[in-house]
Image: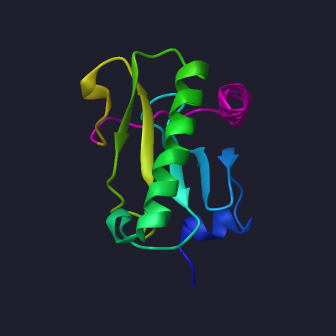
Amino acid sequence: MGSIFTKIINGEIPCYKVGEDASNIAFLDIRPLKRGHVLCVPKREVDELYELPAEDYTSLMLFSQRIARAIKAAVPCKRIGSMVLGMEVPHAHLHLVPLDAEHELSFSNTPLQLSAAEMESIRASISNALDAVG
């Protein structure tokens, strides 16, 4: 049985996908710390990020760099924070979070509750920006 992320990758569970390539997928976190909080996930199901083969790790980092640039273009913020935690889902992933202050990158903060329409609007903005950043 695959992780919830594998089910998203396989199209068994819907997501607000902002980008994808042959090896990775990026989608909005459904419990975002900030508007535009994205998860970048390798399609290879490996529990911990640092267990990924070097080629997959490099691919994910380059993919995440593009996604971060798109988030920054689409969501007003000072910078994009990144975090590797992954205790809740046994599938490697990287959180990218638009930030204006360091304290905003904390999972002790209450997640936002956004409507489906808000999530779709954010998704579209980041996805469109991804096309623009190349």
Q: Is residue 1 left or right of residue 47?
A: right
**Residue located at (52% from left, 50% from top):** 40
Residue closest to the eye, 30 or 44: 44
Residue 30 left/right relative to 100: right
* Percent position of residue 95, x then y: 43, 45
When asked about the image quadrant of residue 19, the answer is top right
Q: Main secondary structure of the magenta part?
A: helix
Going 68% across and 51% down the picture, which residue do you hit? 20
* 39 versus 106 height, above or below: below
Which x, y percent locates residue 14? 72, 56
Residue 108 relative to residue 68: left or right: left
Q: Quadrant of residue 6?
A: bottom right
Name the residue rendered at 59%, 29% in the picture.
70
Which residue does the image show at 62% across and 62% down from the upper left? 23
Region rendered in magenta: 108-134
Specify whether residue 16 is in view: no
**Residue 57 appears at what percent x and percent y?**
44, 60
Magenta stretch holds residue 120: yes
Screen quadrant of the N terminus = bottom right
User: Which residue is situated farthest in the front direction here?
Assistant: 55
Asked whether residue 28 appears in the rendered view, the answer is: yes
Q: Is residue 103 magenta?
A: no
User: Residue 15 or 76: which is nearer the viewer?
Assistant: 76
Give the position of the C terminus as an image quadrant: top right
Between 113 and 124, the one nearer to me in the picture: 124
Quick check: 129 above or below 43? above
Question: Taking 20 as reference, is 86 above or below it?
Answer: below
Q: Which of the colour schemes (rainbow, by chain, secondary structure, one colour) is used?
A: rainbow
Image spot of residue 65 (x, y percent): 49, 38
Q: Nearer the viewer, residue 7 or 115?
A: 7
Q: Is residue 92 above or below residue 64?
A: below
